[in-house]
Image (cartoon, helix red, strand yellow):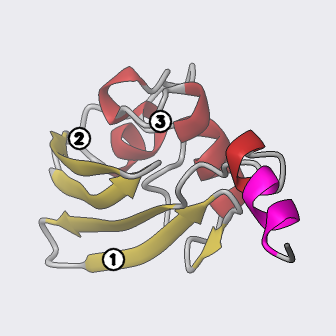
Amino acid sequence: MALLPFAACLMSLSCLAPAQPPASTLQLTTHDTANRIGSVVLTCEPAGGTHPKHDKACAVLQSAGGDFSRIQSRHQMCTLIYAPVDVTAVGTWRGKPVSYRMTYANRCEADRDSDDVFAF
């Protein structure tokens, strides 16, 4: 009879903890024409990792639903100097795989158009 409360708990699911969304972990990299390479880890829910602006980066990605192509760029002017910067993001967002790659005309555009997600 000791199993009766346990069985009732399992049948009603009232004893289970609320489901938490899977953590999001991304490896972000930048590479420019001067051969400078930057790399950080961004974790969200909770925000952390080695990204210097992890709180803001997670908020930006949250508002874009984890889709880098939906990030709203800041209103900021950048020079027209062409110094390409390649950026990548690989990992998971809420349990779903992420693989993103983009080339921006310069560092200013990379920071502006990603709303500082790639500002490290």
What secondary structure is marked by label 1?
Answer: strand
- Residue 7 in percent (x, y) is at 73, 59
Q: Can you say whether 74 is above or below 84 in the image?
A: above
The image's mark for residue 81 is: 2
Query: Is residue 17 at least partly visible in the picture?
Result: no
Q: Residue at x 53, y 56 (%)?
A: 22
Marks 2, 1: nearer the viewer:
1
Locate residue 99 relative to residue 107 in the image: left or right: left
Query: Which secondary structure lies at badge 2?
Result: loop
Give SS at disc 3. helix
Residue drawn where x is 71% and y is 62% of the image: 46
Of the residues shown, which amino acid type is indicated by label 3?
Answer: Arg
Which mark is drawn over residue 112? Answer: 3
Task: Say which quarter of the image contains residue 87.
Answer: bottom left
Query: Which region is colored magenta?
Result: 3-9
The percent coordinates of residue 56 (x first, y second) are 69, 49
The verdict on residue 48 being magenta is: no
